[in-house]
Amino acid sequence: MSHTLHDDHEDHDDDRNNDSLSEERVSAAAQLIAEADSLIIAAGAGMGVDSGLPDFRGTEGFWQAYPALAQARLRFEEIASPHAFARDPQLAWGFYGHRLALYRRTVPHAGFRILQRWATRMPRGAFVFTSNVDGQFQRAGFQGARVLECHGSIHHLQCSAPCSDALWPADDVLPEVEVDEATCRLLSPLPRCPHCGALARPNVLMFGDAEWVETRSAEQHRRYRAWRATANAPVVIELGAGTHIATVRYFSESQDAPLLRINPTEARVGRGRGLAFGTGALAALSAIDQALAAF
């Protein structure tokens, strides 16, 4: 059955209009999912908000999460940089070490399980494309071979030089992370490259980053292309991906497939290209999941 996708948000200045979870729109989304043979999950930072993770929206939001960096007047782009590791490794690792510890103890919200359940009903299953480095999809039970982390993973380390393309799990070096939250400085020993002894850093694509080792991400891209060639009728569900760094949104719109865009503040899609839900990930997924019972 063919569908004409209509986005009411195209006619409004405010993406958070009251009918974003209207019965008609939710039912249309449920029908698209019911008829799909595969699920492409495209996730940005907003996907983790319902799990209690910060999304660093704007400088003020970032500084609220990291008051020590606010006091130092350091923006996200300045601390999330290889230059920060060269200039002040204890501070840079304090920031990333705090995030690593946070991600390790965070329990993924119920929306992850909803997506998994939908995927198991589809002949070609699901593949995840995410700009998040937190590993929450794997933690929620998604197969690592079906996750593409386009900006890398905080759970893997590399040499800061780098002396080679070698990567290794962060658990091997930082089984426990101790950070002074008042100063955002790492109290644990700085992790070192096991090959040359230089400072190790997360295998994360940072701002102004010419040293990122992209071999792991490149292999994930290869696996995605192979899987995508087998998916004949996918539906794309984009969750919490903003326009400031629009990698995920560009990916979603390039898939030549129906798009369900879920974002509480930036849900707009072009007319006829998809359905917009101006709400959080868990609320929209739960509503669509209930509607799927009718199919």
Image: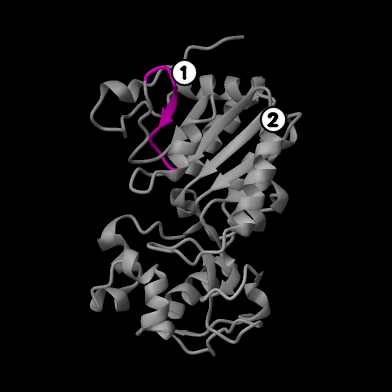
Could you tell whether 111 is left or right of 166 in the image? Answer: left
The quadrant holding residue 234 is top right
In the rendering, which numbered label is found on residue 236? none
> How busy is the neighbourhood of tag 2: few (under 14 within 10 Å), some, or many (20 plus)?
few
> How busy is the neighbourhood of tag 1: few (under 14 within 10 Å), some, or many (20 plus)?
few
Mark 2 lies on a secondary structure that is: loop
Mark 1 lies on a secondary structure that is: helix
Residue hosting label 1: 24
Instruction: Write down the region rendered in magenta.
Output: 271-280
Amino acid beneath label 1:
Glu
204 within the magenta span: no
Looking at the image, is 165 positioned above or below residue 34?
Answer: below
Q: Which percent across, then down, holds residue 153?
A: 57, 62
Q: Residue at x 53, y 21 (%)?
A: 27
Amino acid beneath label 2:
Ala
Could you tell whether 5 is left or right of 146 in the image? Answer: left
Residue hosting label 2: 229
Quadrant containing the C terminus is: top right
Q: Residue at x 65, y 23 (%)?
A: 36
Residue in front for this viewpoint, 209 or 23: 209
Residue in front for this viewpoint, 167 or 270: 167
279 within the magenta span: yes
